[in-house]
Structure formats: structure tokens, C-alpha cells
Amino acid sequence: IITEKGPLILEINARFQGSLDSVEIATGINLFQAHVDAFKGMLPEKPKYQRWGGRTILYASEKPVTVRKQISEVFGRGRFADIPKSGYEAFPDEPVVSILAEGNSRSDVIGYMKEQAKMLHKIM
């Protein structure tokens, strides 16, 4: 947009970042609510990181994967997102489920996500 004061940049396809979950896990802040509050003129204080957070996506590997049980039923204590319904079929290189993790270190988070991915591969 060109104005009397010069050009202005306008993002047309504004959207939340893909790492939204990781930031919320690490800070304990609901980023969507913070976004809404910002439009009301209420800006949050600079967040302090409370822990490490991570999100990874588990993809189907070499052959199609049919999810026979709800992942949330099998791993109730785990943290998952984008959970498919029973009977969902994912073909090679298609996403199956997102694994969320939190921990005291980066290696804790990565280790947990790898552990969950191994367990999920066993049941699919």
C-alpha cells in the first residue's frame, strides 16, 4: 500500500506460526488469547521460559498405515495432536499424528518424542 508517508507492508495471509504448541508448552502462555488481548491494547510481559517444549509429526513410512485404535486410547498419558480417527489410512510420507513433549532439557524433549514415535510404529 502506498501512502503519503511512503509504502506500508501488509501481510495478506496472516497466520499463527507452526511452532505454536512448542512456544505455549515452554512459556505456559495461551498465544491465541495473547493475540486477542493485543488487539485490546493489553500486551503481555516478556515470557519466561519454564521448560523446553517440542512438537514433531509422525509420518507413515514405506507402506500405508491404517490406524486401528485411537492413539489417545492406547497412550492416554501421552500428548498428541491431530489425532486421526480409527480406520484412517495414511500412505507413505503422509502425516499420521503430531507428538507433543515437554521436559527440562532439549534432549529430554527429543528423547520423549522418539520414544513415543517408536511405540506408535509398533501398534500401526
Image (cartoon, rainbow, N blue to C red):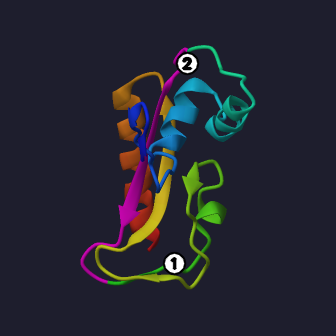
Image depth: mark 2 or mark 1 in front: 2
Residue identifier under label 1: 67
Mark 2 lies on a secondary structure that is: loop
> Would you name the residue on which mark 2 appears?
50
Please state the horizontal and vertical placement of residue 51, each as a whole percent of the image. 51, 22
Give the percent coordinates (x, y) of residue 59.
Answer: 35, 67
Question: Which secondary structure, mark 1?
Answer: loop
- Which residue sits at x=53%, y=28%? 26
Name the residue located 50 percent from the left edge and 51 percent from the top edge: 14
Q: Quadrant of residue 86?
A: bottom right
Mark 1 neighbour density, 10 Å: few (under 14) some (14–19) many (20 or more): some
The front one of 23 and 45 is 45
| 23 part of magenta stretch | no
Sooner in the amino-acid sequence: mark 2 or mark 1: 2
Determine whether, in the image, residue 32 is placed left or right of residue 108.
Answer: right
Q: Are the residues flagged by discs 2 and 1 in contact, CB closer than 8 Å? A: no
Callout 1, which amino acid?
A: Val
Q: Is residue 72 above or below residue 112?
A: below
Q: Which mark is residue 42?
A: none
Q: Residue 122: percent from the left, percent from the top?
A: 41, 67
Please report the bounds of the magenta region as a residue range.
48-63
Q: Nearer the viewer, residue 108 or 20?
A: 20
For disc 2, the neighbor class at 10 Å (few under 14, some 14 to 19, many from 20) is: few
Quarter of the figure with residue 68: bottom right
Q: Is residue 108 left or right of residue 62?
A: right
Say if 41 sits above or below 85 in the image: above
For the C terminus, the quadrant is bottom left
Left or right: residue 81 compared with residue 121: right
Q: Is residue 40 above or below residue 16?
A: above
Q: Amino acid at mark 2?
A: Gln
Q: Is residue 57 magenta?
A: yes
Q: Position of residue 20 (x, y in %)?
A: 51, 42
